[in-house]
C-alpha cells in the first residue's frame, strides 16, 4: 500500500508567501545606525525580496551558489534571508566580530559569489578584501555614496520586477550555510536545507518551544549572523509576527527603549545582553515600562540562575532558557516547567528553569559515557548526543571532523550533561572545559553559576590550571559590579555551603573584563593561556 498524500516540498517559499499574503500589513521595524527608526511591512518586504531574487539572477548567481552577507539586524538583511534561497542561492551570513583572517578563511572555504555588506561595516570588509574574490560587492547604504567598484543595493533592485518566477526546488537543496564560531577549532560549515529550515521554524514556534504567533512582537537581539538569529526570521515569517530589528545598537539602554516603544512581547539574546539589561533595570527600575514583554529567550551559553531569579523577582520578567548549536539550526532544548511543576517550591522551579530543558519536537537526545548510554537519573554524566531532521549529518568540506557523527546516526555535541527522569537536560560543561582534579570531575558551569549569584559579582568564568598533585584545579576569574567590593575570603565563604571541598576554586583572579568569542561567549582558551604560568599553592 502507498500513502495518498501529496509530494509537497517543504521549501522556504511557502513561509515567504504566507507572510506576504496573510500578514501584509504587519510591521517590520528597524533601527538604523543613526538610531532613527525605519518601518516597512511583510507586504512591502514580499515585493522587495522578489526584486532581489531577480537582481541576483541578473548578476549571474546560479542555483547552489553562495551569497554572503555582512550586516547587522535590519529588514534589508531579512530580504536576503528569502530572496537568496527563493532563487536557489545559499544564504551565507558572516560574523563581523571575527578576525579578518577567519572571515577570509570562511569566505574562501564557502566560495561566496556575491557579498552584501552594511556601509557601517565596510571597515571590516577592508580588513580582508584582498584575500577574497566575490564577483560582486553590494552595499546597504544608509545615505552615503557607495564606494567605486561596488553596487548600491537600492539601485540594484530598483528596476526589477516585484514578482519572481519560482524555481522549482527540491526540499533537500541547500538554503543556507553558517560557520560555527570556532571556540572549538577552525570554523566549520553547516549547510541547512529548505526542509530543515521549515521544520525548525515549525518546531521553534510551538507553544512549549518559543510560543510565537501572529500576535507576537519579536525582538531578535541575537544577531542575524549568529545561526540565522536562531532561525527567528523564518519562524516569524511563518507565523506572521511583527519583528523589531535593533540594527547595530545592542547596549542595554537601546534594547530597553525598543522593547518599550515597540511593545515587544518576546526578545532573544545571549546571557551577556541580559546581564547588562538586568543591571540597567536594577539601577533604574521605574525608567522603562516593559510590561508588554512576556518572555526573554536566553541561550548561547548558560543563563545563570541568579539572573533568571533577578528578572522574575525584582521586575516580574520571565526568562526562557534555551540550548542549541549551529549544527542544530540551532534550537535543541527549551526549559519550560511541565504541568504540575508550578506547584513546586520557588527554589526548585528556578533550579529547573536554569537547566537547559526538554528537547523540542523532532529532536532526540541521549547521554553517553565510556560505558555506554547513561540512565536518565539526573546524576549520571555523559556526552550529549542528538539527532533529528534539522541536525547536521556532516560538515561542509571537512572530513577531519567526521568523528563528531556516530556510526549509528547521532551528532556528538561535546557538551557533558545529566538528564533527569522528566527529560530535563542539564549541561555541566563542554567536554574540553571540564576540570579533572585527582580523578574527579568538577563542573566549571556550576561554579560560575553560583558565583554569579553573589551580589558583588557581575561575571565569572572558571578554568582549569595545571597542578602538580591534582593534575588540574579550578581557578575563578571574576569581574565585580561597578563600585562593588568582594575579597577572596568572602567569595570562598559564599561558595562553601554549595560545594564539596575538592570542588572549591583554588584561587580567585579579579579582572576588568573576561575575554569573549565573536559570539559573546567566555573565551576559555584565552583565559587558560593567560593563567598558564599561574602558580597554585601546593
Ligand atoms: P561554538 O560551538 O562555536 O561555540 P555555537 O554557537 O554553535 O558555537 O555554540 C554551541 C554551544 O554553546 C553548545 O554546544 C553549548 O556548549 C553552548 N550553549 C548554547 N546554549 C547554551 C545554554 N543554554 N547553556 C549552556 N551552554 C549553551
Image (cartoon, rainbow, N blue to C red):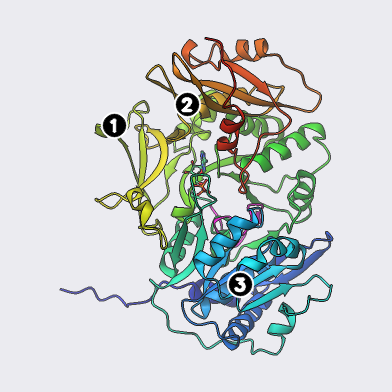
* 217 magenta-colored: yes
Label whose residue precedes the other's in the sequence (3 or 1)? 3
Mark 1, mark 2: which one is toward the viewer?
Answer: 2
Q: In terms of depth relative to the viewer, which is nearer, 118 or 245?
A: 118
Callout 1 crowding tier (Cα within 10 Å): few <14, some 14–19, many ≥20: some
Residue 471 x/y as whole percent: 44, 20
Q: Separation of disc 3 and disc 1 at Cα?
A: 44 Å
Q: Is residue 311 left or right of residue 448?
A: right
Which residue corresponds to mark 2? 443
Q: Secondary structure at mark 2?
A: loop
User: Quadrant location of residue 319?
Assistant: top right
What distance separates the C-alpha of mark 2 from that of mark 3? 41 Å
Q: Nearer the viewer, mark 3 or mark 1?
A: 3
Q: Is residue 192 magenta?
A: no
Tag 3 secondary structure: helix
Q: Nearer the viewer, residue 404 or 346?
A: 404
What is the magenta range?
211-227
Q: How far across and how far down the image is residue 364, in percent? A: 34, 48
From the viewer's perspective, is 167 left or right of 256? left
Of residues 514 and 446, which is closer to you in this image?
514
Q: Is residue 27 visible?
A: no
Q: Residue at x 45, y 59 (%)?
A: 190
Q: Give the labeled residue for mark 1.
A: 375
| Marker disc for residue 80 | 3
Q: Is residue 528 above or below residue 172?
A: above
The residue at the far left in this view is: 1
Please, what is the dominant secondary structure of the magenta stretch? loop
Closer to the chain start, of discs 1 and 2, is 1
Amino acid at each position: 500500500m502507498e500513502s495518498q498524500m501529496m509530494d509537497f516540498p517543504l521549501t522556504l517559499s511557502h513561509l515567504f508567501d504566507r507572510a506576504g499574503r496573510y500578514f501584509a500589513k504587519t510591521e517590520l521595524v528597524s533601527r538604523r545606525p543613526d538610531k532613527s527608526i525605519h518601518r516597512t511591512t511583510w507586504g512591502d518586504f514580499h515585493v522587495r525580496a522578489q526584486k532581489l531574487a531577480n537582481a541576483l539572477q541578473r548578476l549571474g548567481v546560479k542555483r547552489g551558489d553562495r551569497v554572503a552577507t555582512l550586516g547587522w539586524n535590519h529588514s534589508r538583511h531579512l530580504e536576503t534571508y528569502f530572496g537568496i534561497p527563493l532563487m536557489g542561492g545559499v544564504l551565507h551570513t558572516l560574523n563581523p566580530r571575527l578576525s579578518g583572517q577567519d572571515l577570509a578563511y570562511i569566505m574562501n572555504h564557502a566560495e561566496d559569489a556575491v557579498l552584501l555588506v552594511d556601509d557601517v561595516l565596510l571597515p571590516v570588509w577592508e580588513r580582508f578584501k584582498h584575500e577574497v574574490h566575490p564577483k560582486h560587492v553590494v552595499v546597504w547604504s544608509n545615505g552615503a555614496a557607495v564606494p567605486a567598484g561596488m553596487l548600491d543595493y537600492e539601485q540594484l533592485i530598483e528596476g526589477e520586477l516585484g514578482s519572481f518566477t519560482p524555481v522549482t526546488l527540491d526540499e533537500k537543496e541547500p538554503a543556507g550555510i553558517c560557520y560555527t564560531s570556532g571556540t572549538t577549532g577552525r570554523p566549520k560549515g553547516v549547510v541547512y536545507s529548505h526542509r530543515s529550515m521549515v521544520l525548525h521554524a515549525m518546531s521553534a514556534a510551538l507553544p512549549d518551544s518559543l510560543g510565537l504567533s501572529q500576535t507576537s512582537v519579536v525582538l531578535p537581539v541575537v544577531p542575524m549572523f549568529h545561526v540565522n538569529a536562531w532561525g527567528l526570521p523564518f519562524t516569524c515569517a511563518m507565523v506572521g509576527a511583527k519583528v523589531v530589528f535593533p540594527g547595530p545598537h545592542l547596549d542595554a539602554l537601546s534594547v530597553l527603549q525598543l522593547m518599550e516603544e515597540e511593545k515587544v512581547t518576546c526578545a532573544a539574546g545571549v546571557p551577556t545582553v541580559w546581564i547588562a539589561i538586568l543591571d540597567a533595570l536594577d539601577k533604574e527600575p521605574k525608567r522603562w515600562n516593559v510590561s508588554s514583554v512576556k518572555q526573554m529567550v536566553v541561550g548561547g551559553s548558560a543563563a545563570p540562575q541568579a539572573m533568571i531569579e533577578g528578572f522574575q523577582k525584582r521586575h516580574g520578567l520571565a526568562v526562557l532558557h534555551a540550548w542549541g548549536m549551529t549544527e542544530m539550526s540551532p534550537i535543541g532544548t527549551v526549559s519550560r516547567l511541565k504541568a504540575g511543576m508550578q506547584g513546586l517550591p520557588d527554589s526548585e522551579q528556578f533550579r529547573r528553569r536554569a537547566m537547559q530543558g526538554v528537547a523540542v519536537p523532532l529532536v532526540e537526545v541521549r547521554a553517553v559515557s565510556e560505558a555506554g548510554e547513561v540512565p536518565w537519573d539526573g546524576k549520571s554524566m555523559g556526552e550529549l548526543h542528538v539527532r533529528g531532521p534539522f541536525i547536521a549529518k556532516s560538515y561542509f568540506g571537512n572530513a577531519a571532523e567526521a568523528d563528531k557523527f556516530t556510526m549509528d546516526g547521532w551528532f556528538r555535541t561535546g557538551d557533558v550533561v545529566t538528564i533527569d527522569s522528566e527529560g530535563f537536560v542539564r549541561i555541566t560543561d563542554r567536554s574540553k572545559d571540564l576540570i579533572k582534579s585527582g580523578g574527579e570531575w568538577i563542573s566549571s558551569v556550576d561554579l560560575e553559576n553560583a558565583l554569579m549569584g553573589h551580589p558583588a559579582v557581575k561575571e565569572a568564568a572558571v578554568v582549569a590550571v595545571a597542578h602538580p598533585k591534582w593534575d588540574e584545579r579550578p581557578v575563578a576569574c571574576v569581574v565585580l559590579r561597578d563600585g562593588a567590593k568582594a575579597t577572596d575570603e568572602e567569595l570562598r565563604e559564599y561558595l562553601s555551603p554549595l560545594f564539596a571541598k575538592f570542588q572549591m576554586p583554588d584561587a580567585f583572579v579579579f579582572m576588568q573584563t573576561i575575554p569573549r568569542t565573536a559570539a559573546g561567549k567566555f573565551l576559555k582558551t584565552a583565559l587558560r593561556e593567560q593563567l598558564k604560568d599561574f602558580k597554585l599553592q601546593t
